Amino acid sequence: MRTDYLRQIQATIDYIEAHLDEELSLSRIAAVARISDFHFHRVFLVMAGETVMEYVRKRRLARSAYAVAYTDDRLLDIALAHGFQNHETFTRAFKRMFDMTPAEYRKSGIRPPAYGKLDVLQRNTNPYLGGIQMEHRIVTKPAFKVIGYERQTTNNGENLKQVPAFWQEYLRNGWASKIPNRVHADSPVELGICHGYNTDEGTFLYLIGMEATDFDNVPEGLVCREFGEAEYAVFTSPKVPEQEFSPAIQNTWNAIFSEWFPHSGYEHAGKPEFELYDERCGPGNELWQMDIYVPIKRKGA
């Protein structure tokens, strides 16, 4: 089953390569894998390390850079042949990636190698690091309210730096004490919620907060969010020392998408997902762990 899953993703990579000069969208590419748009977006991100549209952009630029370096074709013709709609769009994207315009690149005499497409079948590695077990439970969580602090971040790897930095800022400033109307008043249960995904831009909102009974008298600077009822697969990270906690969480996320989903009969439901931190991860604990809630739906539903 896992090999079939990898082949589905590889089929989309092969499709991208054959259609780089055409207009490509997440939906068009996901249809090749025969899975829903949002689930494909998350699976591709885990397996490739970047969003599918970012991968498309980089492949177009890599191939266009090769053409700029090794041919005398007009730059506009190269742009159009590699899926860019005009010279200006091509030049801006090229400069962002190579720190020089196509004309400067050609003049510099750079001779890049012919970088090949991604091969997930060859790059496959074992994500079960740190004793991760894919034991889980399926729960239906009723609608709930959250009060907290929110930032926008990206799926391009910056989130792996920005989210931990956001948590450090939250803890350092004692922002938890400012959250009112808590459901768990005596023993704080903090949530890190990913929502508001923009798959075209590769951005999402990350909310650190706590479940609330209501939104009355909320201090300025905090956000109030309400999330609907959803079915979740709940995974628990392995018990590790505090200094290994963040990598253990990331490894658990990776294993969910690369190991559990392929043979689960489920796919991501496209609803908010969240991490739950309680008394198991805090001062006084020699080993830390937490829970990950992933919204699910039956395949084909």
Image: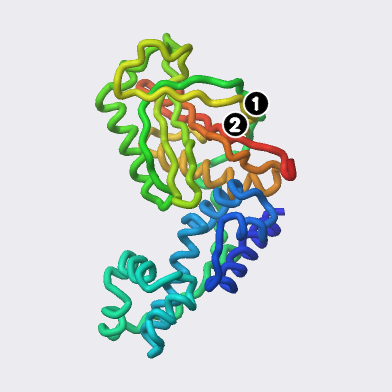
Q: Is residue 118 above or below residue 232?
A: below
Left or right: where 138 falls relative to 69: right
Residue depicted at x 66% and y 29%: 138
Q: Give the amino acid type for the residue marked by disc 2 in the picture.
A: Val
Alpha carbon of mark 1 to alpha carbon of mark 2: how far?
A: 7 Å
Q: Give the amino acid type for the residue marked by disc 1 in the picture.
A: Val
Q: Quadrant of residue 111?
A: bottom left
Give the labeled residue for mark 2. 234
Pointer 1 or 2: first along the chain: 1
Tag count in the figure? 2
Q: Is residue 242 above or below residue 142?
A: below
Mark 1 near mark 2, Cβ–Cβ under 8 Å?
A: yes
Image position, residue 202 (x, y; %): 45, 50
Image position, residue 178 (x, y; %): 31, 16
Left or right: where 136 falls relative to 182: right
Residue depicted at x 31% and y 28%: 170
Image position, residue 54 (x, y; %): 46, 59
Mark 1 Cα within 10 Å, few/some/many (few <14, many 20+)? Answer: some
Q: Quadrant of residue 3?
A: bottom right
Which image quarter holds the C terminus? top right
Can residue 138 be seen here?
A: yes
Element under label 1? strand
Q: Which mark is residue 139?
A: 1
Residue depicted at x 37% and y 21%: 284
Element under label 2? strand
Image position, residue 1 (x, y; %): 72, 53
Residue furthest to the top: 186
Q: Nearer the viewer, residue 126 or 66?
A: 66
